[in-house]
Image (cartoon, helix red, strand yellow):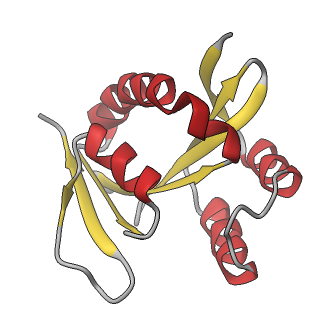
Amino acid sequence: MTVHIEAADVVQVRRLIAASKPSGLSQREFQALDISLAITSKVWIGLYDGEAACAWGLMPPTLLSDQAHLWLYTTDLIKDHEFLFVRYSQRVLEVILEEYPRIIGLTDPQMPGAMRWLRWLGASFGEPQGKYVPFTIRKK
């Protein structure tokens, strides 16, 4: 059993998304994720025994920005190994926060795994904005 998180490229993440089951994402959500990939500056893939379990990336609003918007995509594989991926994500986040001291985003409160992952990464949550809840992760 090995867990590994590595920097990836957009092509690898597109393959991951295409190969995985929809797991609750609508066609519109897949399109939004694909648009996000087009403007993502950095992306990582989480692997469990060589199989892709998750991917996440950062979208800075400008090239000189000190903040970035975070997105996350998970497959069903993450459910059984959530704690391991959180621990590795925390290590990667420490490096990310050196470049972007403020990470922002929106999350769906109907996705408890995503909310838990963000909490473990140190996110603070704002008031709901329609279907989504804004979050911020700051450098300590």
The quadrant the N terminus occupies is: top right
| Of 59 and 91, the residue lying toward us | 91
**Which residue is rendered at x = 71% and y = 71% of the image?**
30
| Of 35 and 77, the residue lying toward us | 77
| Of 124 and 23, the residue lying toward us | 23
**Which residue is rendered at x = 17% and y = 70% of the image?**
126
Inspect this view and state whether residue 62 appears.
yes
Q: Number of callouts in the render?
A: 0
| Of 71 and 39, the residue lying toward us | 71
11 to the left or right of 86: right
Percent of width and height locating residue 59: 48, 58
Residue furthest toward the bottom?
A: 130
Residue furthest toward the top?
A: 1
Residue furthest toward the front?
A: 80
**Which residue is rendered at x = 75% and y = 80% of the image?**
27
Question: Does 49 sit above or below residue 125?
Answer: above
58 to the left or right of 121: right
Write down the quadrant of residue 86 in the picture.
top left
28 to the left or right of 98: right
The quadrant the C terminus occupies is: top left
Inspect this view and state whether residue 44 appears.
no
Write down the quadrant of residue 112 in the picture.
bottom left
23 to the left or right of 93: right
